[in-house]
Image: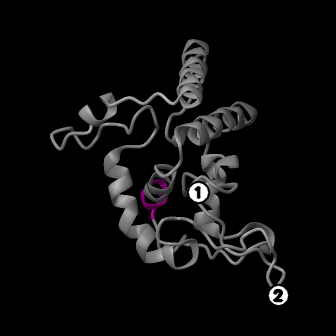
Amino acid sequence: MTIFRQPVSRLPNLARSPAESRCLFLWVLVLFSMLLTGCTSDDQSAGSSADAPKTETVGSRWYTAEGVSRGAPIFARLCADCHGKKAQGTFTWRQRGADGKFPPPPLNGTAHAWHHPIRALGSQIKFGAPGGSGSMPGFAQTLSDQDVIDVIAWFQDKWSDEIYANWLVREQQSRADTQ
């Protein structure tokens, strides 16, 4: 049985306490303020040395740098032909094709992938496009649950901090709704 059909507790733990949620909100507010004022921080580059352990999370995100690295070749082999080498999708992803299906959307944070909780993203990768709305095949016979998580980590790593923060709010709400 896959984690995409099991209880939420088996998925990567993204739950936040009220204090952590307030902290995340303040972090998003500070980030937004920095974007408005044009400030940048060079402190992040210091934390990304080659000596850093591979199990370290990427910033304050749920995934690890190691997971992103494992997801890259999987994406290149199975996903890039349709979603683009940099997860940029097709130019006409919003328009149904002659077959009535939508073309592959961007997964890099510029389309709607960030609107979906990790469970939905994983299910679509494992089982294909829901309701025949797209031509996404399922990879249940090809990818392990860890492979799916790593592919999600790879394309989420392309998301801006603002898009990721918005996704995280939706993810937490989705988990609260299922409990």
Q: Which residue is mark 2?
A: 98
Q: Which element type, helix, strand or loop, lies under badge 1? A: helix
Residue type at mark 1 is: Gly
Mark 2 Cα-neighbour bin, 10 Å: few <14, some 14–19, many ≥20: few
- Residue 149, given in percent of the width and then of the height, sits at 47, 54
Tell me how far mark 1 sits from mark 2, CA to CA: 27 Å
Where 165 falls versus 126 (above or below)? above
In this view, the mark in front (1 or 2): 2
In the image, what residue occupies the spot 38% across and 29% down? 41
- Residue 49, given in percent of the width and then of the height, sits at 20, 40
Residue type at mark 2 is: Ala
Q: Quadrant of residue 108?
A: bottom right
For the record, the magenta segment spans 144-149
- Residue 83, given in percent of the width and then of the height, sits at 57, 71
Question: Residue lying farthest top?
Answer: 19
Closer to the chain start, of discs 1 and 2, is 2
In the image, what residue occupies the spot 48% across and 52% down? 158
Q: Looking at the magenta stretch, what is its main secondary structure?
A: helix
Quarter of the N terminus within the rendering: bottom right
Q: Quadrant of residue 71?
A: bottom left
Question: Residue lying farthest bottom?
Answer: 98
Q: Which mark is residue 122?
A: 1
Where 127 falls versus 28 (above or below)? below
In the rendered structure, the answer to whether residue 110 lies left or right of residue 52 reads right
